[in-house]
Image: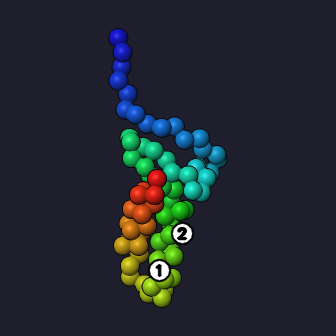
Amino acid sequence: MSVSHPQVAIVPKNQNGPSHGQAKVVENEIVPHEVDIAKLAYERFEARGSVHGFDQEDWVSAERELKSRV
């Protein structure tokens, strides 16, 4: 009898998780590394003139952009 498993790519990890620039794949969804999201979100913050109050929008936007790059 065969058992069906969801397709999940196994990404090698070092002791600190995936290296920068390396996305994980979970249940067929690309998940960028949090450090990469944070860097891009911070770049957006700086580009706006370091105006506070848009951190969630910057994070979601950065995550979306990184997902689309893969």
Residue 49 in the image: x percent, y percent?
48, 88
Q: Tag on residue 65?
A: none
Residue at x 36% of width, y 19% of height = 3
Amino acid type, residue under disc 1 in the picture: Phe
- In primary-sequence order, the first of circles 2 and 1 is 2
Residue 19 in the image: x percent, y percent?
61, 52
Residue at x 57% of width, y 56% of height = 21
Residue 53 in the image: x percent, y percent?
38, 82
Depicted 2 relative to depicted 26: above or below: above
- Name the residue at the top extreme: 1
Q: Tag on residue 39?
A: 2
Residue at x 38% of width, y 66% of height = 60
Along the viewing direction, whichever of 6 and 56 lies nearer the viewer: 6
Q: Quadrant of the N terminus?
A: top left
Quarter residue 11 falls in: top right
- Name the residue at the right extreme: 15
Residue at x 47% of width, y 80% of height = 45
- How many angstroms separate mark 2 from mark 1 (CA)? 10 Å
Q: Tag on residue 45?
A: 1
Which secondary structure lies at badge 1? helix
